[in-house]
Image (spheres, grey):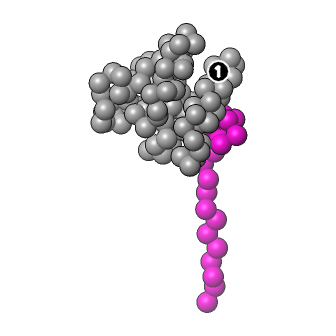
Amino acid sequence: MNILLDENFPLALYFRLHSAGFDVEHIIVLGQRGLPDASIRQRLVTEALLFLTQDTEFEDLAGNTKGIVMISRVPQRLPIADRVETWYNALVEFLAREHHNTLFELLETGEAVPFQIKHLSHRSSGP
């Protein structure tokens, strides 16, 4: 499966994946900085690719896609080298298994889990 890295990921991750033999693209390397989300969504509908992003705009991904979205929750406060290592290891493990979902969260621990819609409970305060 081809990996597509959003422009908000360091190029160090791209180079690490590429040197390990993964089929990887990076929005910046493609010369598509600022590419509209609609263009990425179209690729996800038609291509079997794994899109790694930090943008929550992809939480509403339609279920009829060929691609997979993984939204990273790895905190920006961590050093870049630590984040790259977490992302790299998570992608290696993720790609080694079969998945039936199309939307995942990548937790700070490096674990990729199916995305869960979080509902806020509304309590009435009464009169």
**Residue shown at 61%/69% (left/top)?**
122
**Residue shown at 57%/41% (left/top)?**
79
Above or below 20: residue 61:
below
Residue 39 visible to an observer of this rendering: yes
**Residue shown at 43%/20% (left/top)?**
25
Q: Residue furthest top?
A: 21
Kind of residue sitting beneath label 1: Val
| Dominant secondary-structure state across the stretch colored magenta | loop
Q: Which residue is mark 1?
A: 92
Q: Is residue 114 magenta?
A: yes
**Residue 80 location, x and y as percent?**
54, 37
Q: Is residue 43 left or right of residue 117?
A: left
Question: Mark 1: which secondary structure?
Answer: helix
Judging depth in this view, the residue of 61 and 32 nearest the camera is: 32
Viewport quadrant of the C terminus: bottom right
Displayed quadrant of residue 74: top right
Residue 73 visible to an observer of this rendering: no
Viewport quadrant of the N terminus: top right
**Residue 63 location, x and y as percent?**
52, 32
Displayed quadrant of residue 78: top right
**Residue shown at 64%/21% (left/top)?**
92
Judging depth in this view, the residue of 61 and 72 nearest the camera is: 72
**The residue stretch that appears in magenta:** 103-127
Circle 1 crowding by C-alpha within 10 Å: few under 14, some 14–19, many from 20: few
